Amino acid sequence: MGREHPMEVVGRAEELYCVDGLTFDDTAVRAGVAVSTVKRWAERYGWQAKREEIRQALSAIRTDTIRLRAKLINNCLGSLQAMDAFAVAKMEEVALKAMELADKRAESTPPASPPLREITSEADAVAALEEAVGIRLSALLASPDKVTLTALKEIKTVLDLLKDMRAQAVPETDEARKDRGLTAATADRIRAILGGQE
């Protein structure tokens, strides 16, 4: 018999798949369960039909909201009554808040994390750290409001570490092959820096 999951996990997976429209793979990652488990739940609880029903309902809501806004604006233009103008203003305020909420949700959705790389040597560690710094720097520059002195100091610290690591990565001799791998100090520095990113 398979592992039993709390109903909160099942409910979260259902919401991710049916409401948010994520794929089985993305739902599994975000819910912290196996893809096969999500597929089994989808079949058992009829998620395909729920997903389609929710998609149609959301589409109808968007369409009806646009039609309502158009009718309210036409009524306001025709009557020039204060109540009609107030209704238009309120409806436009609601539409603006909905757009802002959708933008915030899109920004807060975490990107799919790349698979973990295997780090077996100093050169692998340098390459992985360079990639992580590049991703972090790109994300930072894409959102100028997130550029802070603390963030810049973190980047500088990592760049200094990379410089030190590159200097230590000299061509291997027979003696160097015996001491292959990360030193404990370097591993601790990487953990401290990467732990500080989150």
Image (cartoon, rainbow, N blue to C red):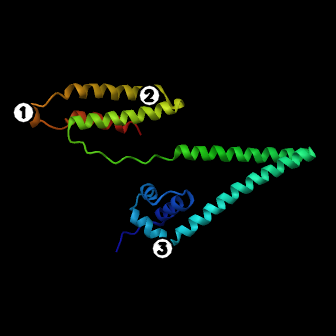
Q: Is residue 54 left or right of residue 192?
A: right
**Mark 2: which amino acid?**
Thr
User: On screen, 40 above or below 171?
Assistant: below
Tally the marks.
3
User: On screen, 161 above or below 91?
Assistant: above
Quadrant in the picture for the C terminus: top left
Q: Is residue 129 left or right of residue 138?
A: left
Q: Nearer the viewer, mark 2 or mark 3?
A: 3
**Disc 2 on helix, strand or loop?**
helix
Task: Using the image, tell me which numbered label, if any, was put on residue 44.
Answer: 3
Tag 2 residue:
150
User: On screen, 76 above or below 30?
Assistant: above
Tag 1 residue:
174
Q: Quadrant of residue 30?
A: bottom left
Question: Could you tell me which residue is drawn at 33 percent across and 27 percent down?
Answer: 159
**Mark 3: which amino acid?**
Arg
**Disc 1 on helix, strand or loop?**
helix
Quadrant in the picture for the N terminus: bottom left
